[in-house]
Image (cartoon, grey):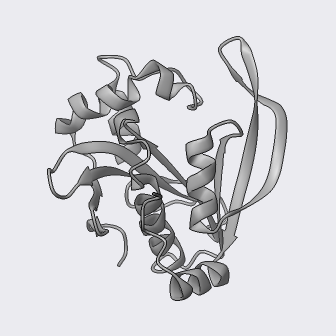
Amino acid sequence: MDGTVDLLTRRLRLRRLTREDEAAVTAYRGDAPASRFLGHGPLAEGQYTSWFEERDAEWELREPGHRRFYGVEVRATAALVGDAVLVRSADGQQGEIGMFLHPATSGLGYSLEAGGALLDVGFGSLGLHRIIGRTAADNRGSVHAMERLGLRREALFLQSERRGETWIDSAVYAILADEWRRKRHAETVFTPSE
């Protein structure tokens, strides 16, 4: 699987975002409380076109450092509930994942499923050696998902990012290709927490 086709999990379909996704993306990325964990403010009405075009131009991952943003869709309803990103490092050997989901889906395990699909592509068809995830240290949902996926915390940066008038701590989690393969072989990671 090279990532240019849809990625299917038990409950989700990760697919290329389209211009027609504007209302759904603006709904979840425009949520002020949820967007506090982003490096920018909420996505406002009228900003989607430029946001989409910037990300869509990098879809093929032609250059190291490019990002592939997938829309995260619930298969049973076809509702777009978030997006997930896979980034190739400048050297092309490592990557980064991130998931941003509508706050209404919190606790359903969708980040876990989407993250697992991204790790499969990164370590599979892209042949990456190591993949990281970055998060605000107080983003408990993101921290929990990364730990359940098998990523370990490698760094904590105190007051490293500014959100409005506040400095926040950020954390970096990582997993190696061999660790992911062992984890995938040993257990099912896509079961939502009880």
Which residue is at a point 45% across and 53% down the rendered structure image?
A: 111
Q: Quadrant of the N terminus?
A: bottom left
Q: Quadrant of the C terminus?
A: bottom left
Question: Left or right of 182: which side holds 152?
Answer: right
Question: Left or right of 139: which side holds 71?
Answer: left
Locate residue 16: give its quadrant. Answer: bottom left
Q: Is residue 116 visible?
A: yes
Residue 27's place in the image compared with 148, above or below, is: above
Which residue is at a point 46% across and 77% down the rendered structure image?
A: 188
Q: Position of residue 51 (x, y in %)?
A: 38, 32
Q: Is residue 89 visible?
A: no
Q: Position of residue 47 (x, y in %)?
A: 35, 21
Q: Position of residue 25 (x, y in %)?
A: 30, 33
Q: Position of residue 68 (x, y in %)?
A: 42, 55
Question: Left or right of 45: which side holds 54?
Answer: right
Residue 74's place in the image compared with 176, above or below, is: above
- Residue most toward the top? 165
- Residue most toward the front? 194
Question: Left or right of 102: which side holds 187?
Answer: right
Relative depth, front residue between 24 and 107: 107
Which residue is at a point 22% across and 37% down the rendered structure image?
A: 21
Residue 54's place in the image compared with 189, above or below, is: above
Which residue is at a point 28% across and 68% down the rendered structure image?
A: 8
Tally the marks: 0
Relative depth, front residue between 103 and 97: 103
